[in-house]
Image (cartoon, coloured by chain):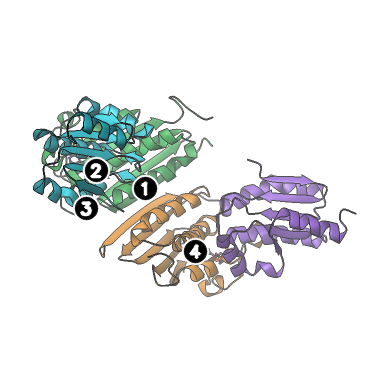
Chain colours: A green, B cyan, C orange, D purple
């Protein structure tokens, strides 16, 4: 199956939907025939970005989070989009351990985890307008366990 | 489903299947009183049931670590699966927190350390 | 949790996505604390409507299927929307065993199953514009096995 | 994963975990040749692995039934879980197709019926 498949899911930005987003992305990428570890990696990365949209993007306000995903053969592309507060200094935000939420016991490792678990990530953000995180991963390229 | 267990200075968190931001918030608010009213000397994170964790879990562990460590307490993680171990390793948390195979190993440590003389 | 939660998912109308749609709806309704049987009922109903959009709505053409779901307390509301061929006689289409696809071995029981597994369904359709199926189900109202 | 098994007029479909329209199409196209080239006298749908089925599964079973029944063949379903039984019941399929507990029960029927004299 070297064809393309796409989906978009939009949901309320409340914390219960973090697990929903993980289940949706896991279900969507099954066609790429990933290992359990690869599924777990993608779930973690998506969980990080969705959580960030909910707690940093929208804080206590309500808002919608959108996850777009495209699969082409075994290549996965994912976007996580919010229309929340945005990030003033993306470079600084992406530094390991940097967090604006230490009193909420945030670790500042969200972006580091996304980078570690995906092949590549990109962040676009504008203060007051929102944030889009783009992620790429090719299945079957590292330490594959089953064929 | 029991989320934690406290007695005599020892607090055990029974972590859920998926330890994300939502779960971490529930765990924190649910155990706030224990930290306010007691001196937690031994804090144990039991990952037996946990198959998923993201950086919110790291935030929970390090945040609790700070509270306990500031008062001289010790923090452990137990029953860590390979999957969770990878995440804990990546976060560098093992520089400050000790991993034990089982809760029994910690009791040995407690006895040796003089907690149960 | 008596609050409201909403989600919308849109995906390519190809047959592989039938199982994706089932997994998404199952993941979304977990908050209503359904029994396994109730989850299965909702999955079946959604599977029927999504399959119809793909095979009758779009036939061999490409197109997008949208599933909107809203949960309020233990009440579930679902819409399945396509912009495909539409249905000329909805009343006739909903009769048990009626099918326009006998040569494809369709059973004509899709709408009957939706009606059996949900509390209520409604169909809106216009030839050349598409079809919307609306479904309602309240969890915990019939033969509940676990509390 | 073996989807079906044919020998001596007996065709067994090993149905998948989820029997929906997508799966039904694959099963049909995968076994078309067998029906074209043989006279299927006994057709067995084995639901052992199946935990989900919708009306596309009913379409598959009744469609195949027609092909086999027209030539005097017999059709059975076996290893039906409670969940699948409910769907089969609702569809009224048991009016035309027999349910057996296991494949061994069908062999008994075959012997009695004179297929293996
Ligand atoms: N979607 C977002 N909207 C607004 N700010 C964000 C968003 N994502 C990340 N940030 C900012 O980037 C910082 C670092 O993010 P991250 O590495 O995930 O760590 P953490 O979530 O633990 O703070 C956050 O503390 C926050 O200030
Ligand atoms: N989304 C749709 N778009 C166009 N036609 C539809 C749609 N859904 C149902 N139909 C029509 O209604 C008929 C009956 O549908 P259904 O009861 O699900 O049985 P089946 O799918 O087995 O034909 C179909 O054969 C088709 O003609």
Q: Nearer the viewer, mark 2 or mark 1?
A: 2
**Residue at x 43% of width, y 38% of height:** A71
Q: Which mark is residue C86?
A: 4
Marks 3/1: CA distance?
16 Å
Left or right of residue C19, residue B5 in this image: left
Q: Nearer the viewer, residue D2 or C104?
A: D2
Residue A101 showing in the rendered view: yes
Q: Nearer the viewer, residue B79 or D37?
A: B79
Does the Cβ of the disc 1 residue fall within 8 Å of ligand 1? no
Marks 2/1: CA distance?
40 Å
Please give the count of numbered marks on the rendered protein: 4
Check the image and report above or below for C61 versus A52.
below
- Quarter of the image where one finds residue C135: bottom left
Check the image and report above or below for D63 versus D34.
below
Q: Quadrant of ligand 2?
A: bottom right
Disc 3 is placed on an element classified as loop
Residue C13 is situated, as x and y percent measured from the top left of the image, at: 48, 51
Q: Chain of mark 2?
A: B
**Residue at x 46% of width, y 28% of height:** A140
Does the Cβ of the disc 4 residue fall within 8 Å of ligand 2? yes
Disc 4 is placed on an element classified as loop
Marks 1/4: CA distance?
23 Å
Q: Nearer the viewer, mark 3 or mark 4?
A: 3
Marks 3/4: CA distance?
33 Å
Q: Which mark is residue A63?
A: 3
Callout 1 touching callout 4 (CB < 8 Å): no
Circle 1 sits on which residue?
A8
Residue D17 is situated, as x and y percent measured from the top left of the image, at: 56, 50
Query: Is circle 4 on the same chain as circle 2?
Result: no
């Amino acid at each position: 199956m070297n064809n393309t498949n796409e989906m978009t899911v939009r949901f309320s930005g409340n914390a219960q939907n973090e697990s929903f987003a993980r289940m949706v992305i896991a279900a969507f990428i099954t066609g790429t025939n990933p290992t359990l570890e690869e599924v777990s990696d993608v779930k973690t990365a998506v969980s990080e970005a969705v959580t960030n949209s909910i707690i940093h993007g929208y804080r206590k306000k309500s808002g919608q989070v959108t996850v777009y995903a495209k699969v082409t053969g075994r290549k996965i592309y994912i976007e996580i989009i919010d229309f929340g507060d945005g990030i003033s200094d993306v470079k600084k935000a992406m530094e390991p351990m940097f967090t604006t939420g230490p009193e909420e016991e945030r670790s500042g490792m969200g972006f580091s985890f996304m980078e570690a678990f995906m092949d590549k990530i990109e962040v676009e953000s504008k203060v007051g307008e929102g944030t889009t995180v783009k992620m790429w991963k090719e299945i079957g390229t590292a330490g594959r366990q089953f064929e | 489903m029991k989320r934690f267990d406290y007695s005599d200075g020892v607090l055990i968190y029974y972590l859920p299947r998926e330890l994300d931001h939502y779960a971490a918030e529930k765990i924190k608010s649910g155990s706030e009183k224990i930290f306010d009213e007691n001196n937690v000397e031994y804090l144990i994170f039991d990952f037996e049931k946990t198959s998923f964790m993201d950086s919110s879990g790291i935030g929970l562990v390090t945040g609790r670590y700070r509270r306990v460590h500031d008062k001289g307490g010790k923090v452990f993680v137990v029953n860590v699966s390979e999957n969770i171990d990878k995440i804990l390793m990546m976060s560098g948390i093992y520089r400050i927190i000790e991993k034990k195979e089982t809760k029994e190993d910690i009791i040995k440590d407690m006895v040796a350390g003089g907690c149960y003389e």
